[in-house]
Image (tube, grey):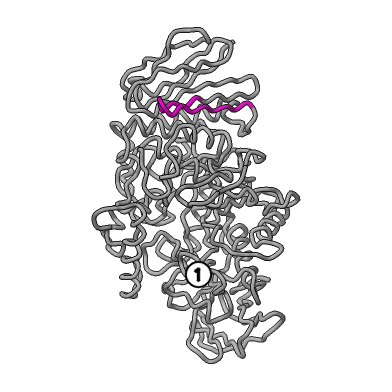
Amino acid sequence: MRVGAAYLGSDRCEFTVWAPDKQSVSLEILAPEPQTIPLTKGDRGYWRAVVTTPPDTRYGYRIDGGELRPDPASHFQPEDVHGSSAVVDHSAYRWGDRDWQGLPLADYVIYELHVGTFSSEGTFEAIVPRLADLKALGMTAIELMPVAQFPGDRNWGYDGVYPYAVQTSYGGPEGLKKLVDACHQAGLAVVLDVVYNHFGPEGNYTAEFGPYFTEQYRTPWGSAINFDHAHSDGVRNFFIQNALHWLRDYHIDALRLDAIHAIYDFGAKHFLQELAEATALLSQAEGRPRYLIAESDLNDVRVIRPRDLGGYGLDAQWSDDFHHALRTVLTDEKTGYYADFGRCEQLATAMEESFVYSWRYSPFRQRYHGSDARDRPPVQFVVSSRNHDQIGNRMLGERLSVLTSFDGLKLAAATVLLSPYIPLLFMGEEYGEEAPFLYFISHTDADLVEAVRQGRREEFADFHAEGEAPDPFSRETFERSTLNWELRQSGKHQVLLSFYQALLALRRSRPALRTLTRQNLQAIGHDDSKLLILQRSAAENHLWAAFNYSLQPQTVGDRPPQGTWEKILDSAEPQWQGAGATAPEKLTPAGETLTLPAQSLVLYERRF
C-alpha cells in the first residue's frame, strides 16, 4: 500500500494517508488553486482521494478539524519541516542510467560522505565534479549520510522527520536524482543511509496521524517506533514503502539501515525480515540487485543469516568490533566501549571471525555479548578505520589523522583494505583530512537547541572528556567540518592519497584480496610486540603481510609458508614518506631476519 501523493499523470494525483483511529481527514490544497477535499476512509485506516491537480501542488492534511499538517509521507518540503508538502512527478526526470546493472556486493568499496560538508556549496550538484576523483581513487560506491528532510539547513541527517522527502537545502528530489544518475554513468553505486528507529524532535507530527510510536520500549531518542503492537501493520508498511521509494524512484542501489538495535519487534516475523523480502521482490522485478546493509552493535548474526536458516536475510552489516580493535591498537584509547579492546589478538580475531565478542564476556557491558559469525562469508561485513560516528561522536570531532602519526594512518588504511571484508572510507580519510567532523544542528526551537547542548555534555561522561564541546547550533561548528579538498594535491596528503590508490589497485588485481572468503585466511596477533600476521590465498595467488602497530621497531618471528616471497608493498619506503625500509626484497621460510620500523607494514607475494 503506497502512501503519500502519487502523481498519476494528466494533472491527476492520488493522495493516501494512514490515520486508522481518526474520524475525518481533509486534504487542503494551498496552491495553485486553494481547495478543501474530504478524504474517504478505506480498509485498515487508509484515507484516499484522486484529485485533479498538477505537479508541484502545495498541500497539507487536517485531522479531525485540527491544525494543518504536512504529509507524513511528503516527497518534498520546499518550506522546511513546518511548511506545506509538494507533489513530485517522479516520471518527469529523464534517467540516463539505463545501462547500469548494479555491482556485486563483493565489489563494493564504499566512500561515506555528508552532503553538507563534502563541499563548500553543500549540495548534491557539488558532489558530481568530484566523482571522477573518487573513481580514480578506487571507490566503487558512495554512501550518503541521511538526506531525508530535517529542520534548517545543517544537520547530520539523523534528525529527519519526513523519511520520503529529500532535504531542500541539498537540492531536493531533482538534485538527488542527478547525483545518482551521474554516479551510475561513472560506474559508481549509491548507498543511502536511512533511519527507521526514530524521528527527529522538530517538525515531527506523525503521532497526530496514528499510532506510529509505542511506550512499550524506549530508545536513546525517546519512544520507540511501533513495529509490533496494535496497528503496527500501518507503521511497517510506511517504512517498507519508504525503502522501496528510494530504491525505485531514486534508483538507489543499497540502503544502510541506521542503528537497527533500536528497532524493537518481538513479532513472529521481524520488520527487517519483511523489509528484506520486499527488497528482494523489487530486485527480481527490476532485474538488478538492491542491498540492505545494517548498522548494529548487537553482534547478532541473525541479522544477515538467510531467512531459510532463521535469519532476517539482510545482505550485510557493519562490524564495530573490527573498528574498535584497530583503533585501540593504534591509539591505546581505553575510555568508554574502547575498554573492551586494545590487544592485537583481538584484531586477529576480528580479521578472521568478524566479531571479537561472539558470546564472550564484555567488561564494558558487564555481560556476555555477541554471536559466532564464522558461518557467514566476509562479504557480509563492512569494516572501517573511521566513520561519521567514530569521529563526530568525539567531543572535539577529531579525525584519526590528528590522533595518530602519518605512519599510523598508512597502517590503518592497509589493515582495512587488506582485510577480507567490504571496506568503507569516511570522506577525506584518503588524504588525511585534518578538519574535525563535529556534531551540528539548526533547530528553530531555542529550548530544543539547549536540550541538545546538554545532551552532548552528558554523552561524553562515559569517555571522561574534559573541556567544553563545540556548540552544535553554531554555524562555525558546521563550517569547520567542511573538507579541505585542495589538500590532496600536495605534501604528505598527496602521498597518503597515492598510498590508498596503491592498496586499492592491489585489492582489485590480486585474487587473494579480491576473493572475500574465510577459506585460506589466517591472522595471528602478538600482544607483546603489537604485531599482526595476515595470510590470504586464492586461485594460486598467495599473500603474506606483517603489521607493526608498536611505536618501536619490532622483529617478526613468524615466517611465510614454503616458497620464495617477493615484497610488493612496504609502507616504510621513502616513496610513502616512511622511516626507511628494513624488510628484505625477498623472504623465504629460513631467510634473513625481518624487522619492521615503528607503525609500518609489509606485504609479500609468493612467486614460486
The percent position of residue 447, horizontal first and vertical second, equals 32, 75
Query: In the figure, residue 552 lies in which quadrant?
Result: top left
Pointer 1 local density, CA inside 10 Å: few below 14, some 14–19, many at least 20: many
Please tell me which residue lies in front, 474 or 590. 590
Return the residue found at the far right.
308
The tally of labels here is: 1
Q: What predominant SS class does the magenta segment belong to? A: strand
Residue at the (61%, 31%) spot, across then down = 515
Please tell me which residue lies in front, 74 or 293. 293
Q: Which residue is mark 1?
A: 162
Q: Considering the image in quadrants, where does the C terminus appear? A: top right
Residue at the (63%, 26%) spot, across then down = 520
530 with respect to 66 (left or right): left
Q: Considering the image in quadrants, where does the N terminus appear? A: bottom right
Q: Is residue 210 visible?
A: yes
The percent position of residue 214, horizontal first and vertical second, equals 56, 74
What is the span of residues highlighted in magenta in the rendered image? Answer: 520-533
